[in-house]
Image: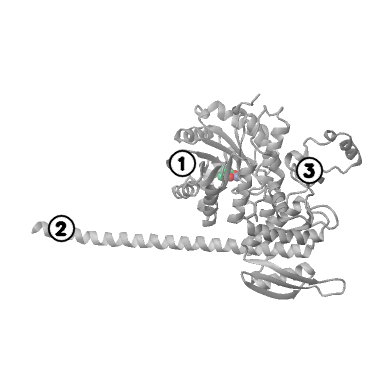
Amino acid sequence: MKKKDKNRIRIFDTTLRDGEQSPGASLDHREKLEIAQQLAALGVDVIEAGFPIASPGDFAAVNAIAQKVKGPSVCGLARCVNADIERCAEAVAPAKKPRIHVFLATSAIHRKFKLRKARAEIIKQAVASVTYARKFCKDVEFSPEDASRTESDFLAQVVEAAIDAGAGTINIPDTVGYSVPEEFGAVIARLYDSVPNIDDAVISVHCHNDLGLAVSNSLAAAVSGARQIECTINGLGERAGNAALEEIVMALKTRSDQFDDLYTGINLKKIVPVSRLVSRLTGMPVQRNKAIVGANAFSHSSGVHQDGVIKKRATYEIIDPADVGLHDGAELVLSKLSGKNGLRQALTRVGISLNDDELASAYERFIALADKKKVVYDDDLIMIASEQMEDTHNLYTLDYLHVSAGTGTVPTATVRVCKGDELLQDAACGDGPVDAALKTIDRLTEVQGRLIDFSLQAVTIGKDAMGEVSLRVAFGDSVVSAKAASTDIVEAGAKAYLSCVNRHLCKQSEADETAAQLRKATRKKATRKKAVRKRAAVKPSAKKKAPARKRK
Ligand code: KIV
Ligand code: ZN
């Protein structure tokens, strides 16, 4: 029997907006588009693609996603400010299903210290902004920021007013991750009891993970009637992150008996590939023991457990790993004898599409790897393809690396990088081969990074596995992350570092562009003011002349 639509939970993915607010997780335009395409294939209902007023880069990414990504609604975030709403409306306009998401803080602490506004002013501003957003777009979502710490009577008033003004979705955020499940479920239940027009909107929730309760709070809210859950891949997000999409979806699926038969439209087999892609492009590693998508999520190490799983999988496994797109030995598909078409097919299976030029260079990398490794796994392919996509668009790429290191040797690196058509080469000594390589890259690129984090993980199994290096690097105040993999871990470190340099330079040029636009806007404003002053200066003399005319 087909389940009733009233049980369907809409998945609102905010990886590209709140997720990108994770410190160090910046994504460029092309990476956002790639993730958005995969989110569409994953089957999310709404993609929150960014905050268009924040920067020209954010605007361009939201706009490109609105133009190119088919399937989900494409949403942009805006404060309750007309300029934000106009910019957001322009960015999402090309989408088949555009949405504007406006937010305004409502809790006493935010009203008093951040906004310095009384309750009545907040309601007035929320209503004005929802009304204004509706002029551009019929799908408007409103979020009373810090809703979970807002007085319940006031929250109900704001929600009722926003629905009256035309908001079709009301999102209740636990902005600071302060709530606990029973309490948060009760917030939603109270709204259903006290807001007369509540049935005219979809109630959504957006939970942060400061107490590790984001998923539990979201599920409790769903039981109380929420029908949209905002979440991110791998739980990325501001501070401790947001509710993890994969955990929400799999909890609803696995324990539907406990969750009133609620269900989502997510294509489960895409969960692991999308998680890997997001981790790779954001440079944010997934902890090994992370539920559903961690490397250990389906590993059994104790003898008793292994024995049980061999006899009957369900003794210790509540989810079949293949259901979430995790392949076992069967994933091993390619060898150095495989052709380009085989590679294309295998990449398609893991959710990656490359154009012909990208495929040609990815194939070269694949052959080089297949020469070194006996077996090539899906994860190896994902690495090759994403490095390929990165290199196509980056300012610097690694062309050559030689290190000499060992007991009693001064570690030295010689590095050659391509910068467009130029080849730059230099050498330096360091505290070890990695340090020497990174110091040489600093000299070549003339930017000075400070390494904050360096972690190494084997991508696949075996002594010949690719080593994946994840780095966090500070360039002044700006922190960026990146990952790279190679069977040579010094090379992986050098590539990841170069990726960080590229990301930093990209961010910097975006900031320069914003500053230039601001300067242009300020100049325009000044010219307008000058013109107004000129007109004002002309008026009195015109007035003076008038009586003279009268006298005539
Ligand atoms: O956490 C939050 O309150 C938000 C809002 C913009 C929805 O991210
Ligand atoms: Zn948030």
Residue 530 placement (x, y as % from top left): 33, 62
Residue 468: tell me if it is visible: yes
Q: Looking at the rendering, which quadrant does residue 448 occupy?
A: bottom right
Query: Which structural element holds mark 2?
Result: helix
Q: Contact (CB < 8 A) between labels 1 and 2? A: no
Please report the residue visible at 55 percent of the width from the left and 61 percent of the height from the top. 510
Query: Which structural element holds mark 1?
Result: loop
Label located before the other in sequence (3 or 2): 3
Label located before the other in sequence (1 or 2): 1
Q: From what the image shows, is residue 391 above or below residue 408?
A: above
Which label sits in the foreground, 3 or 2?
Answer: 3
Residue on which the image places disc 1 = 137
Residue on which the image places disc 2 = 546
Residue 31 placement (x, y as % from top left): 62, 54
Task: Indicate left or right for 139 with 183 as reference.
Answer: left
Q: Nearer the viewer, residue 495 or 285?
A: 495
Residue on which the image places disc 3 = 297
